[in-house]
Amino acid sequence: MPSVLVPLFSGLVTYGSMPAFLRLLQKGEATRLNYRGAAIPVGAGFLFLWIGCLTELLLLLPFSPDMTPRFSPTTGLLPQAIPLFITTALGYGLLGLFDDLVGSRRETGLKGHGAALRRGELTTGTIKALAGVAFGLMLAVWRLGVEGWMGRYWIVVVFVDGLLIAASANTLNLLDLRPGRSGKVFFGGALLIMLSGNPTSLALLPWMGSTLGYLPFDLKGEAMMGDVGSNALGALLGLASCYVVSLGYRSVLLLSLILVHLLAERISFSKVIEHHPLLRVIDGWGRKDT
């Protein structure tokens, strides 16, 4: 299957199966109050996450089992990167699902979870943060191993890349407060990464398609992707950035994401968006709840 057809296929499958999946969530009482106080199915990102993972395997069709080209590939996609992208999506999706299922919304942000920890209370947010950083570092080591590069400053690369993947995952989670917002940020970020021309960025195509297939339901206020979706999409952007951006720029990006997390403790991003004309317009694109 040509790579251009993969996102189309994943999008159509997601769009066609989402109504039944949302009814299943409703039946199982997997709902959460949204910002308007309406009970909405949560964790819908589980479906588009898995469809993205399964259709990602279609990108391996031009290769033989030993990862050598079966015929002259037109994409130049590094086949060894595909398992890394799938593992990233599933790993951070699982951490997000854990928070969706048993997490409490009483403690939010770094201050909230830090205060709970000082009281001797372990929160799902704390577990997700610690496990997310550890998993990001593991993925960074794996990436260098796949590429066969262990240079003099490999520890610095692992540190920057691991934290970047984890911070990207949580950043999309921070933004997932209004219909369609995280999906738009993911799609915009994925397009920017693909403009780099790096063939490995094509690994994002299946999730771009499945996210587009899901977004109409999110924009209408009929579904929430939950942490299972936002965490996975953010981590995928972080991983893809490790392939297409130089170490210096990745360091700047990491510092920027850390600043975003610190600002989130003091200001409301939703209020900032509402008071900025351009951001307000972009945030409102396609929404049916306004």
Image (cartoon, rainbow, N blue to C red):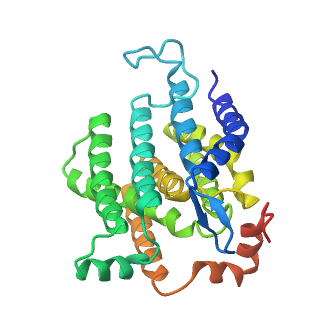
Q: Where's residue 202, x and y in %?
A: 55, 37
Q: Where's residue 138, x and y in %?
A: 27, 48
Total of numbered circles in the picture? Answer: 0
Q: Is residue 166 visible?
A: yes
Depicted 58 relative to depicted 191: above or below:
above
Image quadrant holding the C terminus, namely bottom right
Q: Where's residue 31, x and y in %?
A: 59, 60
Depicted 228 relative to depicted 11: above or below:
below
Depicted 247 relative to depicted 278: above or below:
above
Q: Nearer the viewer, residue 200 or 204?
A: 204
Q: Nearer the viewer, residue 45 or 242?
A: 45
- Which residue is painted at 28% across and 70% down in the image? 122
Q: Where's residue 264, x and y in %?
A: 48, 79
Q: Nearer the viewer, residue 287 or 104?
A: 104
> Residue 81 occupies which quadrant of the picture?
top left
- Which residue is painted at 26% across and 77% down in the image? 117
- Which residue is painted at 31% across and 48% down in the image? 140
Q: Nearer the viewer, residue 89 or 72?
A: 89
Image quadrant holding the N terminus, namely top right
> Residue 96 occupies which quadrant of the picture?
bottom left
Q: Is residue 235 left or right of residue 121?
A: right
> Residue 116 occupies which quadrant of the picture?
bottom left
Q: Name the residue at the bottom extreme.
A: 266
Q: Is residue 249 visible?
A: no
Q: Is residue 194 left or right of residue 254?
A: right
